[in-house]
């Protein structure tokens, strides 16, 4: 139509009134109360089940729950998880079962924090924390390794690898019958990580920060 109106639409506006109506939305927002987040000085509490950074959990005696099954990697829609499993031995045991996760990596450049990996885990080894501050200055630092994801040690735990609780088997761990490390339990030598036999009783080095974190109950 010559006047810019739409045929059959009695409420149609002229070309001049269209931009005015659009700017009206802007002017209304100018007088509304502004919402300013005082971050990082004030951090807003997250919901209890917030999907934040992942965590690899331990059994109450310190052995790892991850069995290296790679189901989390298969379930990930963004292909952000990489897992390599390996066999436990009596001389170097990381989990109560036959296998453990030797290599575990999550690429947070790809991760969408959907939680499907948590649902796929058969041993509840992988959960999500409330930590959301994942920004960094390099791509490499956003690929979290097993040492960075592994939960810290609580009282009554001994860092892996170490022997299974005497008289218990893998099923007893999942039944909750193991509540702490057996008296006299000592950390074994991590030969697969390049440790010499005399280093077995010492703590991990600076590349293994999980061994230095002890959570007080």
Image: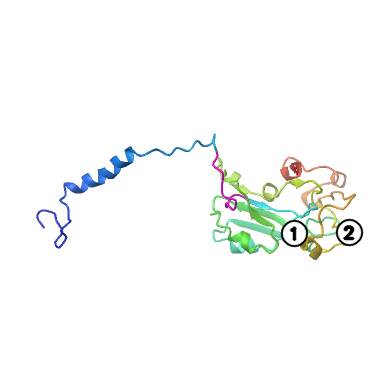
- Please name the residue that numbered disc 2 is placed on: 166
Q: Secondary structure at mark 2?
A: loop
Percent coordinates x, y for residue 150 in the rendering: 70, 50
Q: How many marks are shown on the rendered structure?
A: 2
Q: Residues within 10 Å of mark 2 (few under 14, many from 20)?
A: few
| 98 or 46, nearer to the observer | 46
Q: Which of the pair 157/92 is nearer the observer?
A: 157
Q: Which percent across, then down, holds residue 149?
A: 67, 49
**54 sits to left or right of 206:** left
The residue drawn where x is 61% and y is 60% is: 117
Answer with left or right where residue 190 lies relative to residue 1: right
Q: Is residue 134 magenta?
A: no
Secondary structure under tag 1 reads strand
Q: Residues within 10 Å of mark 1 (few under 14, many from 20)?
A: many
Q: Position of residue 101 (x, y in %)?
A: 72, 57
Which quadrant: the C terminus?
top right
Where is residue 165, by image quadrant? bottom right
From the image, give the main secondary structure of the stretch colored magenta. loop
Residue plotted at (17% across, 55% down): 12
Question: Looking at the rendering, in which quadrant would you find the N terminus?
Answer: bottom left
Region rendered in magenta: 43-53
- Expressed as whole percent of the image width and height from the top left, the position of residue 10 reads 15, 58
Q: Pointer 1: what residue?
A: 100
């Amino acid at each position: 139509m010559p006047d810019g109106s739409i045929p059959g639409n009695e409420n149609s506006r002229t070309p001049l009134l269209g931009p005015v109506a659009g700017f009206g939305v802007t002017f209304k927002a100018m007088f509304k109360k502004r919402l300013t987040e005082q971050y990082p000085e004030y951090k807003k509490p997250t919901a209890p089940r917030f999907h934040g950074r992942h965590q690899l959990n331990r059994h109450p005696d310190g052995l790892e729950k991850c069995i290296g099954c790679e189901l989390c990697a298969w379930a990930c829609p963004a292909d952000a998880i990489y897992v390599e499993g390996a066999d436990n031995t009596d001389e170097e045991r990381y989990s109560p079962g036959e296998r453990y996760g030797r290599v575990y990596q999550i690429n947070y450049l790809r991760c969408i924090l959907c939680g499907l990996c948590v649902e796929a885990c058969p041993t509840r080894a992988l959960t999500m924390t409330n930590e959301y501050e994942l920004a960094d200055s390099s791509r490499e630092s956003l690929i979290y390794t097993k040492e960075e994801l592994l939960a810290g040690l609580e009282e009554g735990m001994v860092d892996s690898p170490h022997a299974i609780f005497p008289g218990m088997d893998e099923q007893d761990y999942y039944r909750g019958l193991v509540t702490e490390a057996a008296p006299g339990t000592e950390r074994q030598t991590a030969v697969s990580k390049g440790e010499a036999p005399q280093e077995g009783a010492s703590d991990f080095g600076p590349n293994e920060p999980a061994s230095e974190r002890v959570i007080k109950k």
